[in-house]
Image: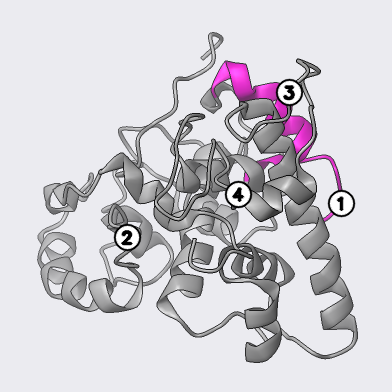
Amino acid sequence: MGASAGGGAQSSGGSGDTTLYVAAGVGMGTVGCLIAPLFFLLLLIGTIVVSALGWIFWPLVLLCDIGLLDCDSDSGGGVDTQQVVKAFNSDGKGTLNQSAVPEEHLTRIQDAGSLCTQIGPIVIVSQIQLESQFDPGLIGPDGAEGISQLPPDKFEEFGEDDDDNGTTSALDAADSIMAQGRYLCSLAKEIDTLVADGQVTGDRLDLTLAAYEVGLEAVEQAKGVPQTTQAQSYVVGVRSSFALYSDSVDLTDETYPSLSARPTPSADN
């Protein structure tokens, strides 16, 4: 996380997952999609990839699906690209694919995604995927802690003893996830007011996610999602997992690969 008012995205890089096996083509079936990204990745480094995040090199299939690359329509490896694009552009309030979520965190993710009408469980789990890759003990270089990587001041404000174990801790997954939900809801309400007053414009979820990452003040000053690599890549980063966790998208790890570590699926998967 860049500003203390934001989340902990760059601490996700603590996983050290900076391998560039995007060159494997991640399921692309055409030569065009394999050659074009070689040049495109040079631009990608400066525009989408935040150096502090380290691990982000987006799957080429996602780049094709959301229109950042011009790829053959048959190159999706069985992915319904219309479903993927629809999920990417959604508000994240659809039905959660429960079997894709680690069973031990499922209830809290659902609870956090029901705290307010603006934020759904798909947003919560996708943000966790980006922030910590489901590591509840992660401590980031910026001081952010836990599975949701809230900075200490924000966890102090929004954290509670949600699992009633007598301790409120950012390293307690239940406490961290619920604090994440409360913080997102607080930001979403602020964004609603700013949009209604005409002080900012843009997609409200994008604005909320950007505020989580770079701070609400930065969004206000930019009058929208800041045109910075940090803010822009964070929004794309969270949205890129919507298809993975949406029950409306029919895909598998094999047809929609990602460089982020996969969570352990629920027992019923």
Earlier residue among tags 2 and 4: 2
From mark 3 to mark 1, how far is it between C-alphas?
A: 28 Å
Earlier residue among tags 3 and 4: 4
From mark 2 to mark 4, how far is it between C-alphas?
A: 39 Å
In the picture shown, does residue 132 fall above or below 240? above
Q: Which mark is residue 212?
A: none
Instruction: Name the kind of residue labelled 4 in the image.
Output: Leu
Instruction: Name the kind of residue labelled 2 in the image.
Output: Ser
**In this figure, which residue is indicated by the disc labeled 1?**
117
Left or right of residue 77: residue 10 = right
**In this figure, which residue is indicated by the disc labeled 2?**
73
Q: How many neighbours does mark 1 have within 10 angstroms: few (below 14), some (14-19), or many (20 or more)?
A: few
Dots 1 and 2: beta carbons under 8 Å?
Answer: no
Q: Indicate the secondary structure of the residue bearing disc 1.
A: loop
Magenta range:
102-122
Earlier residue among tags 1 and 2: 2
Give the camera-side residue of 48 and 132: 132
For discs 2 and 3, the disc positioned in front in the rendered view? 3
Q: How many neighbours does mark 2 have within 10 angstroms: few (below 14), some (14-19), or many (20 or more)?
A: few
**In this figure, which residue is indicated by the disc labeled 3?**
167
